[in-house]
Structures are given as structure tokens and as C-alpha cells.
Image (cartoon, rainbow, N blue to C red):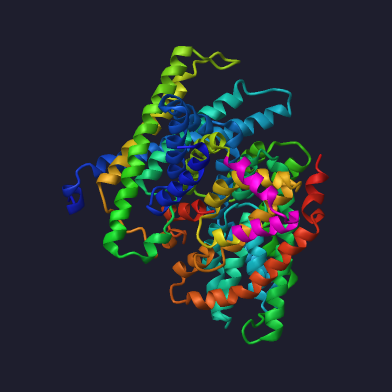
Amino acid sequence: MRDDSVRARPWRPILAWVESVANVVAAASLALVALITAATVTLRAFGANVPDAIDFSGFFMGVMIFWGIAAAFRNDNNVRVDLLLFILPQRTEAAIRIFGNFVAAAFMILLAIAGFQHVDLVLRSREVTPELRIDLWPFNAVAWIGLALAALMASMSAIDWPRKPRSGNEPLDNAAGSSPAQNKRALDVD
Amino acid sequence: MSTELLAPVGFAALFALMLLQVPIGLAMAIVGFTGYAIVVGFGPAMAVLASAPIRTASDPALALLPLFILMGVVAFRSGISGRLFDAGLKTLGHRRGGLALSTIAASAGFAAICGSSAAGAATMTKIAMKPMRSSGYDHGIAAATIAVGGTLGILIPPSVALAVFGILTEQDIGRLFMAGVVPGLLAVIMHMAVISIVARLAPHRLPHGRRFSWTERSAAYAKVWPVILIFLLVLGGMYFGYFTPTEAAAMGAIFTILIGLLRRHLPLPQLGGALVETCRTSAAIFVILIGAVVFGYFLAITGAPHTIAGWIGELDLPPLAILGLILVGYLILGCFLDSLAMIVLTVPIIFPIVQNLGFDPIWFGILVVITIELGLITPPIGLNVFVIKSIEPDLSLGSIYKGVLPFIGMDIIRLALLVAFPWLVLALPNSMG
């Protein structure tokens, strides 16, 4: 049975799917960063090393962060100043939220365009890793896809408003840590 | 527009965008990009936008942030905090205010593996508030104890705030972490002293519980050894120079996961959830860091830090008075701004001034973090207080703030002590291998 919100906003299931893919890609990249770094330390004790460990850590970090940003935009996890919202009437608050989301979306699109220029530059320069001589551009391209998805998510949250009120007690409830999504916010704000 | 005028206009635009709900990191990037484009041109500004985000996001030296966050999230999901509280209760529960003392001890233990204040406050509210209420504790003081205990997360290493300070100022993060140890322990002792004093003055507000046998205590201690092991691995590894901070973070995260899995405290779905949660938290932090990098280009081109340092230099005030003014400024900002945003926004401007005044950067970092820590419990925003209120809605904010007051007084004394005796902060980092 489809609920009303799905009928009214048919793109929501697609965005939810994109978000779950972004979560998996980001989480796998984080796990790889942890494993590569820990393996480097462990192998060092035996006089060995992981080839291009620092470069690979960096690549997977980039992938994790940009895909993580995409998921963060979908969940509205960005850190904002809520101070003004506490004292404003609801209509004004909604208007300000829409403004903030549109500005964020516009800038994320610009960021994605600029990021594509960077990938193009790396592709043309034929840069490779120092030890294994692996091309750099595919890693940059995967990270950039995350950035492009982040721009998409930011744009959709600007269009698809208001999902939920952000003022009042809501961000504080998030900090309560009663669900995975809420726990995250508790760590965000530090 | 002259570059001198551009900086104040940029700051005004930045605060306007932040108040208008643009995410803090993006607001910084927007102002940084626009300002740079005005001075240097659109092409070079686009070049900054093309390279700065990917360079920041894929900087392996910054991997310590997500890895330390992962360590904290996994520890949280493994239920370590509950076992810490139990160990604290069995050691201190028989004293007046024993549950409150246990809360501070458990918060300190949790802070040793989790660098977040709000997470500590949220966790401890769920664990400690109910027993304190049912034991007849004054609700305001009980909640205040949790709020104050939560602030230890930002100071006791590993601390996300200290790591970000180190990244921004290019200071050794390992030394910064070591510098947080003594002030963190001092905070624990002083918070416990406040509880003991209140319990002595008003015993009915903080009653004592029963004494536990050594068998019961030993059983509780046996459950918290992973915390001690992980803390020693991370801090010891950095102190003796075996690990870089990033490597220490990775080893800490992997060990926390392994211990959780082997002791069956961390089911696989929880591990997956911890990874996702860490990515989102890290992403939110990196948006701010990326914004700070882009904004930094703008600041550099306007020469704002240099100009402000010049103005401060012209003031006929002793260095300690200027330091006092800076810390008061942080206290005021802490009432309104997110702690991480505050560090990212102010440190690039304030830090050159502090260096000009000849203060030790590591010492200054600790003072800033302690001041920011105060902002987490002071009105009107006091994030930790709000976190507790959101979990225990029947508590009044007024009663929690009233309960927090003696702790704030003690924190100010602690800050004064650390200003007067910098060696309290610097002895440990200066002895590092």
C-alpha cells in the first residue's frame, strides 16, 4: 500500500534508495580507511608496508566524505544556527528554511561543477599512485559522483519542503540518541 | 570595494547567511568563494572551489576525525557507558551524592573513548537519571551533574574539538591530546568536589546509597577493562611515539570493534549502523572544514587576521588582559554558536594574535576548549542542558541551570588555575617521546 506522501512525491522512494546506496559506499570506504591504516601500523612492526597506503587512505576518505555528505543532505544533518528560528513565527521560520535550502542547493551545484573540473584535470594529467602506478582519476571520479549526489540531494530538499520542522525541540530530540539517525546528531554538534 | 572593507562585509554576510539557515560550512564557503572572486576573479575562485574540497576531504592526515568518531560510536553502541556507570556506582555509591559521583566518573571514562560532549550527556541521561531520581536526588542537581559530566568529552582525549583546533593551527594533535589529560582529570576532581560540598551542605538533596562488597566491585571492574585498554593503547601509542594520531585512531577504532564483537556486545547490524552514523557525522564536520578552507583563502587575501592582530597590538593592554578578553569573547559566543563552528570561525583570526603575544599554542588550545566547554552548560543555549531536557522533558530548564551554577563557578576557578599555572597543561606534552 502506497502512502499519501509517496503518491504526492513520487521521487521520494528513489531518493531513499540513493541514500541507502550512499550509506553503503560511505560506510565501506570508512571501513577501508580504518583497515588500511591499521594494517600499515601492524605491518610496520614486521618491517613491511601496504603499498600506496597513504594515497589509498586519502582516496577512500574522499569517497566517504562526499558520499556521506549526500546522505547528510538527505537527512538534513548539516550543522546550522537555529538561534533566530526560536523567536520567529512559523511562517517566517518556514520562509527562512526554504531560503537556506535554496542557497545551499545552488552552491552545492556550483561545487559539483567545480569538482568535475578537478576530475577532468586529474584525468588529463594521467596522474598515478607512486608505488603501484594506479590511475588516480577513477578514485576522484567516484568521489565526485558523491559530490554530484550531494548536489542532487540538496536540490531535492530545497524543492521537497517542509519535510519536518527544525526549530523547537526537534534538534534536541535528535541529540537524545534514541535511534541511529538521532545518535549521529548528538555527535555532530560537538 | 577595497580589501579592507571586504573583510567586515564578508563577516556580516557570513553571519547573515548562518542566521538564514544556510549550513555553517556552506555559508563560509559561499562568502569565501564570493569574496575571493571579487578580489582575484571568477576563474581563480572556481579553481579554489575545484581543488579545496577534494583536497580537504581526501587529506589522509584528517582521517583521525572519522576514525576517532567511529571509536566513540562503536563504544556507545557496545553499551560501554552503562558498564562504566555500574563500576562507578559500586565504587562510590555508598558516599553522599554517590550516584552523582558515579555519573562524573562514568562520564570521564566514556570521554576517554568518545570525543563528543552531547553524546556523553545523552548517554548518561539515559543511564544515570532514573537511578538518581528514584534515590531521591534533587532533579536539578542530578541533571546538572550529567550536563557537566558530558562536557568532559570535549577535553579528555580523544577530543574532536582539540583535533580540529590542531588541524586549523597546524599543531601536533598528539601533544594537544596529551595536554588535555591533566585539565581533564582536574575537571573530574573539581566536579566531584562540588558534588561532595553540595551533599555535605544539603544531604537531603544528594543522599547516599548502599556499600557494595569487593566481590561485587571486582565483577563490575572486570567489565570495564576494555575502556582502560583502548585508552592506554591510543594515548600510550601516541605518547611513546609508536603511532601518529591517525594511526592511534585507526587502532583504537579497530580494537573497539574487535572487543565489541568478541564479547558479543556489538551485533553486526549495530556495527553497520555505527559505520553509517560515523560517515554522516564526519560528513557534517567536513562540510564545516571545507568551508573553513575556502573561507581561509578569502581571509588571507583580505589580510584580516594581520589587520586585527595589528589593532590588538596597538591596544595598551598586558598580554594576559588580552587573553582574558579573548576568553570572555569565547564565553559569550559559546552561548549562541555551535562549538565546532566557533573554533573554525574564530581560531584562524585569533590564533595569529595569540602567537604574537607569545603564548604557547597548545596551552591556548586547551584554554579555548575549556571555555567552549563552559558554553555547553551556560544559558541561553547550553547544548548539554538541552540534550537532557529533550530526554527528560518534565525537568525545567531553570532547575537544571540552577544546578549547573556551582559547577560553572568551579570551572572558572579551574580556568584561572590553568592560566596561572601553564605547566599543568604543558608538563605532559612536553615530556612526550
Residue B339: x %, y % from top left: 55, 54
Q: Which residues are magenta?
A: B304-330
In screen coordinates, is B354 left or right of B380? right
- Report whether residue B217 is seen: no
Quarter of the N terminus of chain B within the rendering: top left
Residue A179: x %, y % from top left: 42, 56
The residue at 69%/36% (across/down) is B244
Camera-nearest residue between B371 and B46: B46
Residue B111 higher or lower than B241, as above or below = below
Residue B6: x %, y % from top left: 48, 41
> How many tags in the picture?
0
The residue at 58%/68% (across/down) is B146
The residue at 54%/75% (across/down) is B400
In screen coordinates, is B79 left or right of B419? left
Prevailing secondary structure class for the magenta stretch in the rendered image: helix
Residue A118 higher or lower than A171, as above or below = above
- Is residue B307 magenta-colored? yes
Quarter of the C terminus of chain B within the rendering: top right
Camera-nearest residue between B193 and B294: B294
Residue B91 higher or lower than B173, as above or below = below
- Report whether residue B244 is seen: yes
In screen coordinates, is B347 left or right of B319? left
- Is residue A97 magenta-colored? no
Camera-nearest residue between B406 and A51: B406
